[in-house]
Image: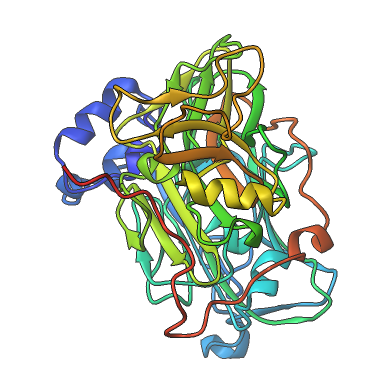
Amino acid sequence: MGVVAGVMHERAWLTAAILAVGLVAGPGTASAQSTERGSLHRFDPSGRPAWTSPENPTGAKGAGGRENRGGKGHAFETIAAGASHVLADIRDAGIIDRMWMTIDDRSPERLRALVLDIYWDGAATPAVSVPLGDFFLHGAGEMRPMETDLLSSAEGRSFISYIPMPFRRGARVVMRNESDKQLNLLFFDINHRRVAVQPADAMYFHAWWTRDRATRIGDAHDVLPRLSGRGRFVGASFTVLTNPVYEKSWWGEGEVKIALDGDGDTSSLIGTGAEDYIGTAWGQGAFINRYQGAPVSDEAAGRWTFYRFHVPDPIFFDRDVKVELQQIGGWPKGEVMRLQRQGAPMLPVTIDPGSRVDFRRLLDGAAPVPLTTPGLPEGWTNFYRSDDVASVAYFYLDRPENGLPRIAPVAQRLAGLRKPAPTGAPTAVQAYTPPAP
């Protein structure tokens, strides 16, 4: 419950809220108070800090900087093509408070080919198994300076996580190089605290990546397949590469749906559109906020990366959870009909003339209503479409393994990556504009 809230700062009431739910506070545990600004002057005996880095790979007390007589003798590691490196192998109970790393090659191909794996308590499968770039909100392969509540990149050249990650018997953080080139320079440190015991209700952090190269018409993109257990959905990041057959049409009309605790075909939590989910409207430009944003909004090249973190609006589940993003776009009716005539794969769903009075639903009947049907109004027309969508689901679970499908092979992850559009390239998307009054 309060694990993610423990990293929030600058609001005094948060300390009391975190202590009330008791996930990371208590005698002999990693207290949430130690991360709150208002408690910086207080001594917290609950955990002792340890860093694992190339200079101290075990994080042991007094064991750092032994090479070259302490003169920066081992500041980075090198990972051969197809090899991996253990960034941290921690025994007993503790909590990872922060991870920092940087690499010399930050190309789109490298960001997708490197995989961050994290194992809890000696588990056989990782709770986190995500391409490095996607995990840190750089899913479009372009790094931007950013500062969010959970993930950041100070100048667009580093990777930082402030996501609290507790464990009971051990933690193992691994970087895998699945590219065909050696990674020459990997700098990192994994900052954690060793504690005596974790509270019974402290949950394990998980992250899952998936990609649909071409979503099926009418099917949603599964951000998180139905997952049984007790936990908290923290949020998601998305990367959308639009299908050129839809030309300048807007891609982001699809709604985020979250099914909780036995929901069937209809979900308890549902928004009104992709850009609405991350707090903006009438299209999606580039912006970065603490809990929501779009680091990349490259209309000319059809590339977007965006995110939403449910820190101030927590989403808990007792039995199961499922998260999906519909694949719906929109454009004026005449343009949609032209795309249909050109053979673009789609299924029209609604027509919006500008008010609820004449709003038309095209899927309520036994068969879809064709746009050529006489008497239909003109207006903004939404339609199911097929684009290239990737996502990362961030969540906590009451167990160290999640049973989700393993990450796709590197060839599938790298296929179809796009470069940024040249400076000054024309806009490629027309978002919905409300009719003039």
Instruction: Tell me: 5 left or right of 209.
Output: left
Whole-percent x, y for residue 350 in the image: 48, 30
Note whether residue 148 is visible: yes
In the rendered view, tell whether residue 187 sits above or below residue 273.
Answer: below
Percent position of residue 419, x then y: 61, 76
Image quadrant holding the C terminus, namely top left
* Residue under the image location 42 percent in, 53 percent down: 162
Position of residue 165 in the picture relative to residue 365 (left or right): left
The number of numbered badges drawn on the structure is 0
Residue found 45% across the figure and 85% down from its top: 423
From the top left corner, tell me how far across and down residue 384 is, in percent.
60, 38
Viewer-nearest residue: 243 or 120 = 243
Which color scheme did the rendering employ for the protein? rainbow
- Front position in the image: 344 or 426: 344
- Looking at the rendered image, the quarter that the N terminus falls into is top left
Residue 137 visible: no
Q: From the viewer's perspective, is residue 281 above or below residue 347?
A: below
Left or right of 275 on screen, residue 100: right
Residue drawn at 36 percent across, 41 percent down: 276
Residue 160: image location, x then y, percent: 46, 62
Please determine whether, in this image, residue 18 is positioned above or below residue 12: above
The foreground one among 211 and 351 is: 351
